[in-house]
């Protein structure tokens, strides 16, 4: 069949109806009419470059030597920060406080943020090194650091999160979400960039893990696949609009282990050294040192009943 002429598709009517939907009936554009959007593809490139900057022998050029590695790191970082600066400038315009900011002032603010972010990279690498050590110590199947860096989805997810959290703290939440959603797509691990996560954090296997915006996680915490640190309820204002930023996710103290499929909801505290068993559903706090399973709660040296676990409580 020969190619039909364009008018056979009814393009004029379709284009007109799409314009009506876009401009009048079902608007999705930013209220300020912003068209210069941040680029997800650009952020993918930035994150890949930053990984190479922090771990050049694993993610960088294959022919690096002791003499060339610093040049490579500097050159790669310079290029990445230039791209990041432009994305920060675009993303700032989506914040209410910058809706009317003059362009020179916006550019200056984007430069300050990008410079501060670059300065934070050595500290981010240091905490990532603790996460890698935790993965090696926590998984008997882990052979060496190279395997962990190149193969472990939990380490990839936390690497993205550390970068995203830094941008979140610097006031660029949109780009922070870009970074975490890139990791989410690749690993199935969903960590909001606002979550506060201490050092030596390890997610084993990882698929299906969800960590909410206001979660606070201490040091040396280990999670397994399909763990949810979520919200139990969502406060709303008088108009029924959800209140943003409300503390609604769990606090997990140091040295906690949470096994596969556990769901912990609300602003509850999982005490230091507690162990949460697989598939447990929790909406109450757990004492330090407690061991919670589907059928029981055991607190070290205590005989108090504890209603935190679904099912009966053993003394």
Image (cartoon, rainbow, N blue to C red):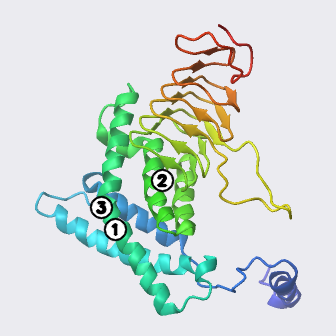
Q: Position of residue 275 (x, y in %)?
A: 54, 23
Q: Residue at x 36, y 48 (%)?
A: 128
Is residue 11 visible to the viewer in this orientation of the structure? yes
Q: Are marks 2 and 1 in contact (CB under 8 Å)?
A: no
Which SS class for mark 2?
helix
Front-lying residue, 262 or 104: 104
Pinpoint residue 132: horizontal percent, then vertical percent: 35, 41
Q: Where 117 falls versus 254 (above or below)?
A: below
Identify the mark nearer the N-term, 3 or 1.
3
Helix, strand or loop at mark 3: helix
Query: Could you give the CA–CA distance between mark 3 and mark 1, rounded to whole angstroms?
Result: 11 Å
User: Are dots 3 and 2 in contact, CB under 8 Å?
Assistant: no
Q: What residue is at 85 percent from the left and 91 percent from the top? A: 12
The residue to which callout 3 is attached is 53
* Numbered label attached to residue 118: 1
Image point (39%, 73%), residue name:
114
Distance in Å between CA atoms under marks 3 and 2: 16 Å
Q: CA distance from mark 2 to mark 1?
A: 16 Å
Quadrant for residue 241, please give it.
bottom right
Q: Earlier in the sequence, mark 2 or mark 1?
A: 1
Residue of label 2: 161
- Binning the other alpha carbons within 10 Å of mark 1 as few (below 14), some (14 to 19) or many (20 upward) gives some
| Residue 306 percent across, percent down from the top left | 68, 19
Residue mark closest to the camera, 3 vs 1: 1
């Amino acid at each position: 069949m020969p190619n039909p002429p364009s008018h056979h598709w009814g393009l004029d009517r379709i284009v007109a109806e799409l314009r009506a939907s876009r401009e009048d009936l079902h608007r999705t554009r930013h209220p300020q009419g912003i068209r210069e959007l941040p680029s997800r593809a650009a952020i993918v490139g930035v994150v890949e470059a930053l990984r190479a900057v922090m771990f050049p022998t694993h993610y960088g050029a294959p022919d690096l030597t002791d003499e060339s590695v610093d040049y490579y790191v500097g050159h790669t970082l310079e290029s990445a920060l230039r791209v990041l600066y432009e994305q920060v400038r675009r993303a700032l315009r989506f914040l209410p406080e910058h809706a009317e900011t003059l362009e020179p002032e916006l550019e200056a603010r984007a430069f300050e943020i990008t410079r501060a972010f670059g300065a934070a990279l050595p500290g981010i690498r240091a905490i990532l090194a603790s996460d890698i050590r935790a993965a090696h110590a926590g998984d008997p199947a882990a052979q060496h650091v190279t395997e962990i860096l190149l193969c472990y989805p939990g380490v990839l997810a936390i690497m993205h999160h550390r970068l995203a959290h830094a941008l979140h703290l610097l006031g660029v939440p949109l780009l922070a979400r870009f970074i975490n959603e890139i990791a989410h797509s690749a690993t199935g691990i969903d960590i909001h960039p606002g979550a506060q996560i201490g050092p030596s954090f390890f997610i084993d296997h990882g698929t299906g893990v969800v960590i909410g915006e206001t979660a606070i996680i201490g040091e040396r915490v280990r999670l397994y696949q399909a763990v949810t640190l979520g919200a139990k309820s969502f406060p709303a204002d008088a108009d029924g609009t959800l209140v943003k930023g409300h503390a609604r996710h769990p606090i997990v103290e140091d040295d906690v282990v949470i096994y596969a499929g556990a769901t912990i909801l609300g602003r509850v505290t999982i005490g230091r050294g507690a162990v949460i068993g697989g598939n447990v559903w929790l909406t109450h706090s757990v004492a330090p040192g407690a061991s919670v399973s589907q059928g029981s709660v055991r607190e070290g040296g205590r005989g108090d009943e504890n209603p935190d676990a679904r099912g009966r409580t053993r003394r």
